[in-house]
Image (spheres, rainbow, N blue to C red):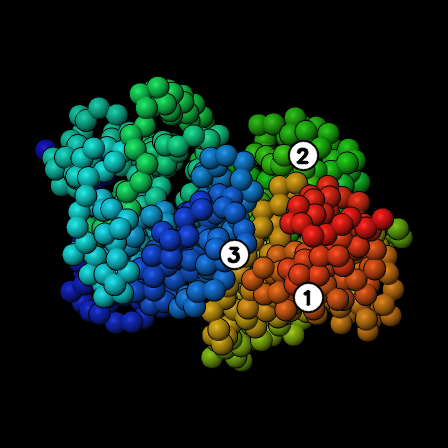
Amino acid sequence: MTYTQNDYTPLENLVRKYEVDGTFAKSQWQKEARVSVIVTTYNQPEQLRKQLLALSQQTYNHDSIEVVIADDGSKKGTGSCMDLVAKMELPFDVKYVWQSDKGFRLAKSRNEALKKASYETVISIDADMIMSHDYVEKVMKWHYASQNAGMPLMTTQDRAFVEPTDMNEDYIKRRELHKVKRSVSRRFKRDKDWRHKDRYAETNRLERIPNDVEDPTYFVGSTISGGNCSFTRSAAFEAGLFDESFQKYGAEDTEFGVRMYEHYNVKLRKKMYFVPVDTIAYHLEHGGPVSDKDSEEISCFFWDKVKKARERKVLPTPEVSVYVPCYNQERFVAKAVESIAKQKNFDLSKLEIVIGEDGSTDRSVQIIRQLQQKYAGRLNLRMIGDGKNRGLAENTNRTIQSCRGKYIMQLDADDELLETAVSTLYSTLERSPDASLAFGDCLDRDVKTGQVKAHWSCNEFTPEWYRNNHKATTPDLVKIVREGMRIHHPRMFRRESYFKTEGVNSDLQNAVDYDLYSKLIEAGKPIHVKAPLAIYNINHGENTTNKGRLQAANDKVVKHYTDRRNTNSCKRKEFYDIDENNNRVRHLDYQQPRARQELLYSTWATEENQQKGTKLYSALISELENVVSFFRWCKPNESEEALKLLLQLEPESHLGRYFQATFLDSRGKKTEALRVLQRVNTPSARRLEDIILQQGGIKATA
């Protein structure tokens, strides 16, 4: 009998080859194969602590592990999950991604973590699924093989059930989880993982699935558990991430697995293997069975989603995606798209245009819709966005992450491509498999006078430069770019290279290109084509040439974080607050809380002569407020230093006065706190005032 559904024998043979030839016995493969481990949690500090201890005991190289904690709205403050992570000394980089509590939003929480992950391979695991000590290593052997074979991969791991009280931390520290007493699943009322009997026993762990099995997509995809699986990150973005409309417990992970299998193996007719890896995560039992009513409701919702996903048409993967970030560009966006439509020496059926519309308030959206109608049947033109303004950094990430092409080309909505831009950069990258990006030269056009002149052109990264500097290493390239932006318009990069980075820093109001391309050269060399391939429109008030000192300050921020990434002086520990009210993502560096604030302040003080009301000043005030509000409970000294500067600059800042009152209250200076609160006219100030008064012995001041 032949088995074509999920016969991963070729990949298994490659794993065995690496075992036999000594590849896995050497340390180099672990340095090359990096992984983002997404740990989901919600008010589970004890479980999270045990999981982080288990990760600290992994046999895998800790320098190649990044942990991204996806928090679905846990409480903040002392004793919280966030407090635990802030205080723990951990041997790997940590990112903590927190969203507000608006009910069960596990799918959204995972997606937010995926957006902030840095690496192409992702392990998704719940805080209460404690990893065995070889878990990461065993999973990564399969991903290392799949990456070398040039194919995406999804894995699921075995699980055992244990009572929380039986999972002693000593077992974790001694790497003896196999000695923990096994229990019975409170939800499934069984002591074995259901997949062993219902899926693995008759199929040699999904490797020998009969061709006549009913609904092979469901048969394979339903084995995925979001709390104990792994996958290729770029593949998840291609298929659409976790479905955020699942807002009750259960089935969002099964739907994701089924959709991933369907998307690749059925619709695109590409091979994505689903492999059950022989390693165990131990589930700390809690809760109980799902009611029949809830189970039926979840099942109906799940199958409705599966039906719609199967009906959805998926176009072939394009060779090139051109991403166009757009905000209030009604004057230029049509010209930008028209310049793509005029490309020569390239089959436009193999190209897509992805316009990231960032909540424009002018006629940009209307114009883009007209362009879609105009080029229907000739150009694959998609517009993404939800009508909200996310800011340049997040819109850039969102737009790139929506691109499906092998290569991704940047075209700002106020610029234009010359006719051979796509074909030239595409052929350059096709000839250069070790390059992460290629870029050309451009012509500056003054939109007021019409005057055109050559844009400055760097002398590095040309064929001649590489011949003369043939031993140039990644640190050499990083050092050059650190000295100033060398990678000018137009630019094209490999999609796979982007997913080896964390994307653009969400703090940045501009300098996003500098940040992105500083990261992309860490994934491979850049190639410079010394030929004009684009028009760079200047002197119209919206491009970075008009951003002044804020641009200079953000350049310093980019250089600072570039240095951080390329030194191992200390492990990174960063927090991301998904601010849905303001459509922004706040980024906070636990190791250096005031680094960005100090860079903004020094630039403002020295280059703007402390002039208020500028864009740089607004960015400085916003950063000070972020530092004060976030670090007051885990690094109060840093928070108070930022508060002093905030009140020095803005004495009547409501936020500053409110936090000044919280500090006074924490030190027992309640009368002074009440006096400060009288100057703050916000609901939160009134609530704090009531709390202080209810503590007794204090009278409200007149």
Three-letter code for the amino acid on which mark 2 is drawn: Gly
Three-letter code for the amino acid on which mark 3 is drawn: Thr
* Mark 3 or 2, closer to the camera: 3
Q: CA distance from mark 2 to mark 1?
A: 37 Å
Q: Quadrant of residue 558?
A: bottom right
- Give how far across and how far down residue 200 sits, in percent: 16, 38
Q: Nearer the viewer, residue 672 or 536?
A: 672
| Quadrant placement of the N terminus | top left
Is residue 684 among what the camera can see?
Answer: no
For disc 3, the neighbor class at 10 Å (few under 14, some 14 to 19, many from 20) is few
Is residue 700 among what the camera can see?
Answer: yes
* Location of mark 1 (residue): 640
Three-letter code for the amino acid on which mark 1 is drawn: Glu
Q: Quadrant of residue 479?
A: bottom right
Q: Is residue 367 left or right of residue 375?
A: right
Q: CA distance from mark 3 to mark 2?
A: 37 Å
Furthest residue in direction front, as rendered: 697
In the picture, the disc for residue 387 is 2
Q: Quadrant of residue 267?
A: top left
Q: Earlier in the sequence, mark 2 or mark 1?
A: 2
